[in-house]
Image (spheres, rainbow, N blue to C red):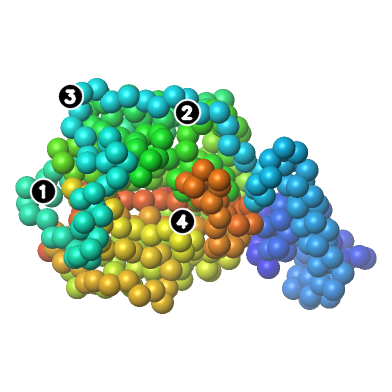
């Protein structure tokens, strides 16, 4: 039971009526307001047998609402209220922009070849400077798109901004045609964990948007993601975003030469579980350099079997995806959009970083004017 913020609520125990100071955590998760507040632990425990029936009724009502929102002509069992919307035509890239090897075919051949070796690359000073440049450019583009993430904007409009701003900087938007991905960035809303395809969906007050931008410039990729509140969001949603942000910061703080990549997941999971959230397991951080994705793989949960010891010059992402409910996920029929299996919302933050002799350098760090809904 957690301390509540409402000042005028009364204890829900029949016959009590004292001012409430506690809120049932399950009621909070299910967004139940009525009969969810109590004056003390004894009052809460004394009525628990009857009170838990409130949870069952609310959960059943929410599930019925989800089922009622499904289109009658769509056979796919969506887990939440979001549905795919219309998508704009494929955006073109000018000839003068240098492109990764998959830009035409969709097949990242050099990446696939490197995966056979499973070797973690150590970058030299020249390559690190190239990473620093592209990561700075990616941050600039993300910040410009984030400023437009307001109620009434569409996710396709955000994609157009990313695409245009990338080209202005002589960059290729890395997601475009990577294994066939049809857009220039990922816009993942509410129950979408990651890899959401930008479409005509309109952002509305209370939404939670994950905006993931990766650019390719001078032969290197820079990758980052932030979670943004669209207008005013609920308290539990706000907590989800903050916990996700904090979990990334805790993991980054441990990055230094000699650290095991597998240890990062336990740091993230320990923090997340204290708030009754869960760590998505299907997607992980990754090496990044001249390749979009390469070794090492960095799971965000504990007791994983990730291989590798950090050395100066290693460049990679940490990008925890944290869910309100289950850690399990499902894919939409587009084979890209990953959603929570129970339809509850998720948040994500990501940085690209390089290990230094002293510790770590966050290459995609926020700039003085960056939008920071969580900090």
Q: Of the residues under marks 3 and 2, which one precedes in the sequence?
A: 3
**Which residue position holds label 2?**
156
Element type where label 3 sits in the image: loop
Which mark is on residue 321?
A: 4
At 37% from the left and 25% from the top, the residue drawn is: 91
At 14% from the left and 38% from the top, the residue drawn is: 218
Mark 3–mark 4 CB contact (< 8 Å): no
Which mark is on residue 364?
A: none
Residue 71 visible in rendering: yes
**Which residue position holds label 3?**
96
Q: Of the residues under marks 1 and 4, which one precedes in the sequence?
A: 1
Q: Is residue 373 left or right of residue 350?
A: right
Q: Of the residues under marks 1 and 3, which one precedes in the sequence?
A: 3
How far separated are the C-alphas under marks 1 and 3?
A: 22 Å
Question: In x, y percent, where is residue 127?
Answer: 11, 48
Mark 2–mark 4 CB contact (< 8 Å): no
Are there few (<14), some (14-19), or many (20+) residues within 10 Å of tag 2?
many
Question: In x, y percent, where is residue 59?
Answer: 77, 57
Q: Of the residues under marks 2 and 4, which one precedes in the sequence?
A: 2
How far separated are the C-alphas under marks 3 and 2?
A: 24 Å
**Which residue position holds label 1?**
127
Element type where label 4 sits in the image: strand
Q: Give the quarter of the image for residue 29.
A: bottom right
Are there few (<14), some (14-19), or many (20+) residues within 10 Å of tag 4?
many
How far separated are the C-alphas under marks 2 and 4?
A: 23 Å
Q: Nearer the viewer, residue 176 or 136?
A: 176
Q: Is residue 194 left or right of residue 277?
A: left
Q: Of the residues under marks 3 and 4, which one precedes in the sequence?
A: 3
């Amino acid at each position: 039971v957690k301390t509540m913020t409402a000042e005028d609520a009364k204890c829900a125990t029949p016959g009590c009526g004292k001012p409430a100071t506690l809120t049932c955590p399950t009621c909070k998760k299910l967004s139940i307001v009525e009969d969810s507040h109590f004056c003390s632990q004894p009052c809460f425990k004394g009525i628990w047998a009857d009170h838990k029936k409130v949870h069952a009724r609310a959960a059943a009502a929410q599930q019925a609402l989800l089922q009622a929102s499904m289109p009658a002509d769509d056979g796919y069992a969506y887990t939440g209220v979001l549905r795919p919307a219309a998508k704009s035509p494929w955006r073109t890239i000018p000839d003068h922009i240098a492109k990764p090897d998959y830009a035409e075919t969709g097949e990242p051949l050099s990446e696939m070849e490197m995966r056979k070796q499973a070797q973690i690359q150590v970058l030299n000073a020249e390559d690190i400077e190239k990473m620093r440049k592209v990561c700075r450019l990616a941050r600039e583009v993300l910040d410009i798109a984030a400023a437009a993430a307001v109620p009434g904007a569409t996710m396709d409009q955000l994609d157009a901004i990313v695409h245009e701003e990338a080209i202005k900087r002589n960059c290729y938007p890395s997601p475009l045609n990577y294994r066939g991905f049809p857009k220039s960035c990922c816009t993942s809303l509410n129950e979408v964990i990651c890899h959401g395809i930008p479409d005509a969906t309109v952002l509305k007050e209370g939404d939670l948007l994950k905006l993931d931008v990766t650019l390719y410039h001078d032969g290197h990729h820079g990758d980052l993601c932030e979670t943004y509140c669209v207008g005013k969001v609920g308290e539990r949603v706000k907590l989800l975003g903050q916990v996700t942000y904090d979990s990334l910061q805790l993991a980054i703080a441990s990055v230094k030469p000699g650290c095991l990549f597998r240890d990062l997941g336990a740091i993230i999971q320990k923090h997340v579980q204290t708030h009754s959230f869960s760590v998505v397991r299907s997607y992980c951080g990754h090496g990044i350099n001249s390749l979009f994705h390469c070794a090492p793989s960095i799971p965000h949960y504990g007791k994983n079997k990730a291989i590798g010891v950090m050395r100066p010059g290693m460049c990679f992402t940490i990008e925890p995806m944290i869910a309100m409910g289950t850690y399990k996920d499902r894919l939409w029929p587009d084979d890209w959009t990953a959603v929570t299996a129970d339809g509850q919302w998720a948040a994500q933050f990501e940085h690209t970083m390089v290990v230094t002799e002293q510790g770590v350098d966050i290459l995609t760090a926020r700039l003085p004017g960056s939008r920071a809904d969580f900090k």
